[in-house]
Structures are given as C-alpha cells and as structure tokens.
Amino acid sequence: MSMSEDRVVEGCGSAEAREFHHLKQRAAEYYRSNAVPQRMQQVLNTMFYEKPDDVYGHLVSSLPILGHSNILKQENAFVICWDCRYNTEFIDYNLQQANYFGSFANPAAVSRIIGREILDINSQSTVEVEVLCTIKNFEKSVCFAAMSNCCSDPNYTTQGTGANDNEQKNQSVKFALEWINGPLNSMLKGLLPENQTHVDRLLSDYFRRKVEEDEEQRNKDDEEEKPTEPELPSPIVSAPVGDKKKKSPKDKRSNVPEKTINPRYPPEALFPGSVAIGVVSLAMAKAAARLQKTHLYLYIASLNQAEESPKEMRMPLPLISLLDCGKSSGGKLRLLKEVIAVPQPSLGYKKDVEQWNKLCSLLSPRCYILADAASRSIDKLLTDGLGANQCSGLVLKHANQTTISNLIHVAKLLEDNDCRFIPGLTEEDTTDNSLADIAVGLGARFIKLGGLCHGERVAKYNRLLAIEEELAQRGALGQSPQHQFPVIREEEKDLDPEKTQSKQLS
C-alpha cells in the first residue's frame, strides 16, 4: 500500500477502515507464504503475451474457483483478498477447467462407490456400480459400469434352469450389493483409481478370503451334522445249512456298478456375489480413464504395455456366424443343430485323441481352430496354465470375479503361447460397451459379439465404429496383418522351435 493510502486510512480513523486494513495485510501475508502471488503473476503474464480474445474465458481455463474476490496490487504481484463489500472487480473461475492450479491440487481419489440392481438383456438381475471421487474438495460422479451376472460357468454351454436359475441370480446380486455398498466401499475409499494393479489385488484378496471363509463354514456345518451313533456289537451270523445255490453269471454282472462318463470340462462352481469383484474393477478402470481425460482402450493399452503405448492400434476382426442352427433358426434349419465327426467303432478313446491331433495338424496351417464352449475360465487359465493347447485361439468371457488385471495377464499368457485371445459375450450380457475398449486395448485379433442384432451387441459394434473413427482421425489406425495360422503339431516336444513358427496363407 502506498503512503497516500496509509494517510487516507489513518485520516479515516474509523474502526471499520482499520479492520479492513489489517485484513488485507493478513491476506497478503497468507498468500505470499503459500506462493500464490508468484503463480498468479505467471498466469497473468502468460495471458498478456498470448492476448486471447476472450480474456475471462482464458482465466476460466487457468484459475480455480475462489468466489467473488477483490484483486489488489501489492509488491508487483496480485493478492486475492476475501471481501465482497469492495467489489472492485469480480472473476468467476471454473473448478473443473482449472488446468494451471489443478497441478498443485491433490489427485482425485475415490470418495465412495455405489452398487445398484439393474436388469440385463434377459430382464434378470445384475449389478451396476457408480464411482464417485473427491475432485478439488468436491464430490463428483465419475462413471458407471455394469456386468453380466453369471450363476453358471459362462464357458460351459448348458440350458437354463428356469426359476432356480433366477433365484440363484437374485441371491448372487444380493451378496454382490452387500459387498459393494459395505466392505468394498470402505476398502477403496481414498484410493486413486489409476492404481489399477493395487485395486485389483485388493479385490482379489477380498474374494479369496470370502471363499476361504465359506469353505471353513461348510466344513464346520458338515462336522456338526454328522450323527454320533453308538457302536453296536457285530451280530454273529451262523453258516447256512443246506444246499448252496450258485449265482448265475447274469446275477453277478448286475452287482457291478455302472461307470459314468463325465464331461471333458465340467462346469465350475461359481461363488455367489463374485460379480461384485469384476464390475468394481471395470468401474475403477473407467474412472481412471475419465479422470485422465482419455479413452478406456488407451488406458487399458497403457496398462498392458510395459513400455510406451504403441503409436498405432489395430481393430479386432469380428467373428460373425453366417449359419446358425437349432431352435433359434427358422424353417428346416431347426432340424440341424451342429455338425460333428464320429470316429469308427474300432477306435478307442486313446485313438480318438490321436485322430484329433492329426486333424488339428492337417487343418491348422490353413485355418484357425478356435475353442468357445471348450474354453476354460480365465481363473483356471491363470492358476493351471494353458496346458497342452490344441487350438489356435480361445473365446473368453469377462464375467464374475475376473478383474482388468486378470484379463491383461491371460492375454499375455495366450500371446506367449501363440494362441489368440478372443473376447466374447456372455448369454446374460448388458448394454455396457466396455468390452469393445478392452478388445482394442489388449490388441485382440478377433472379437466375438454375435450378429448385428439385439441392443447389447449393437452397443458394442457402435463403440467399435467410434474407436475406429477416432483412431483414423488421429492417424493411429494400424492395418491388420494377413492371417497367420499357428501350426498345431501332433507331438510338440519333438519339434524344433524354429519349425513351429506360424505360416502365412498364400
């Protein structure tokens, strides 16, 4: 303040003027100790040289909300003084677009997550999650995510069980909502959504603990239900007197128990409420992408790449059935469900396996051999590995307790084994189109969404169209290479690794 202004304040002599003078001094010292004048001066100097047409619009994109304030000049800087009685000049600042001061603010952290019950394409219960974050002291809704609620193995084709199936779905949704709105909400509060690996580890650990607790409780219940019968003395059986009749061979055979033939890949037991793990992981990934002002597929690509994200990205090729038979088909096609190969009667089960290996060896250099219903779940692949792979690719579903980190790991596992990772839809899917971003972000060669019908499929096809257009506009749309079919040998162990390289179709 100049000497003339000091004389004016002293001459005024009023208590109000002296109070305001001391208030300005305290405000100046407060902001000077926090380096606010220097940063404000940088903003205003930059604006002076750029000379934007919309001065206040430039300030909106540079400064945070400080309310209605006076701008007073002091020591060749600008001091913000809170006092609306002296409205010399007012500036409204936009919080969300405060790019400059936003770099000095705390990063956006999860304030809470909200789980809600919604309906899937079959009008059955599933789960939606909303993520809310604290952004510059304000709670904002960031994103929504939904996932199908599978109460049976999504990789195992079975017929629905009607009312029992619906009851299991409702029970699973009930548990999932209790987890999301209770312990998971408390566990994730204050975490940064961008720490995807840490978040997924917490979710997986929580799910593992729930499974272990359930197993312990089941074992405890089984032990309590076991009846304690008193030991009785064994009765003395006297030898029968008289002629002994020999049993006929027919009676002897009837006592032999029949052997049951189990399916090759029996359906896996799914834990009720497991959908909470997968949908929360997806929601956190979408929140991180939204906060970073990027697309979900770019965010997933950054998680998938140890180094810098690729400059070009390819679009997955859609797998669309041209001929679908069975009950959903019309006319005489309803009479045909599938075409299968039947071995000769003289071949045993071991010879069947040898014939399948020969068939794969003959066909694999000329086409892809993809496993859909024969695919194991993502959890099984991560725990047991790929094993003796007899296919060119696996169609895998994002469902239940599968996290984004799980998807990244299984995609790398298949890539290391020259096997194609193919994201596919479940039978109880939703209109959430995140699967398209996941396929592009993980560099999937194919994606299986089904025909161009039904809302859940069209939503994902529309998302693929939008991603392709966005990549083309940025000049980052890469061209898909020619098909290269991984050669499946009858005996992999006897082959030279250099001879097992993929052959290009001429």
Image: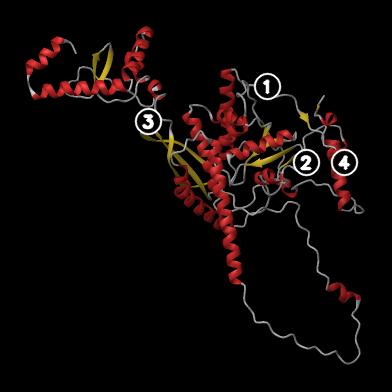
* Disc 4 and disc 1 in contact, CB within 8 angstroms: no
Mark 2–mark 3 distance (CA, rounded to whole Å): 51 Å
Mark sitting earlier along the chain (2/1): 2
Mark sitting earlier along the chain (4/1): 4
Q: Mark 1 Cα within 10 Å, few/some/many (few <14, many 20+)?
A: few
Q: Nearer the viewer, mark 4 or mark 3?
A: 3
Residue drawn at point x = 72 percent, y = 24 percent: 481
Mark 1–mark 3 distance (CA, rounded to whole Å): 42 Å
The residue identified by callout 1 is 479
Residue 322 percent coordinates (x, y) = 71, 37
The residue identified by callout 3 is 136
> Is 225 situated above or below 295?
below
Mark 4–mark 1 distance (CA, rounded to whole Å): 34 Å
* Disc 2 and disc 1 in contact, CB within 8 angstroms: no
* Disc 1 and disc 3 in contact, CB within 8 angstroms: no
Quadrant in which the C terminus is drawn: top right
Task: Tell me, yes or no, if residue 32 can be seen here.
Answer: yes
Quadrant in which the N terminus is drawn: top left
Residue 325 percent coordinates (x, y) = 72, 45
Q: Nearer the viewer, residue 460 or 59?
A: 59
Q: Secondary structure at mark 2?
A: loop
Q: Which mark is residue 358?
A: 4
Q: Nearer the viewer, residue 220 or 241?
A: 220
Q: Amino acid at mark 2?
A: Asn
Q: Nearer the viewer, mark 2 or mark 3?
A: 3
Q: Secondary structure at mark 3?
A: loop
Residue 68 percent coordinates (x, y) = 25, 24
The residue identified by callout 2 is 389
Mark 2–mark 1 distance (CA, rounded to whole Å): 28 Å
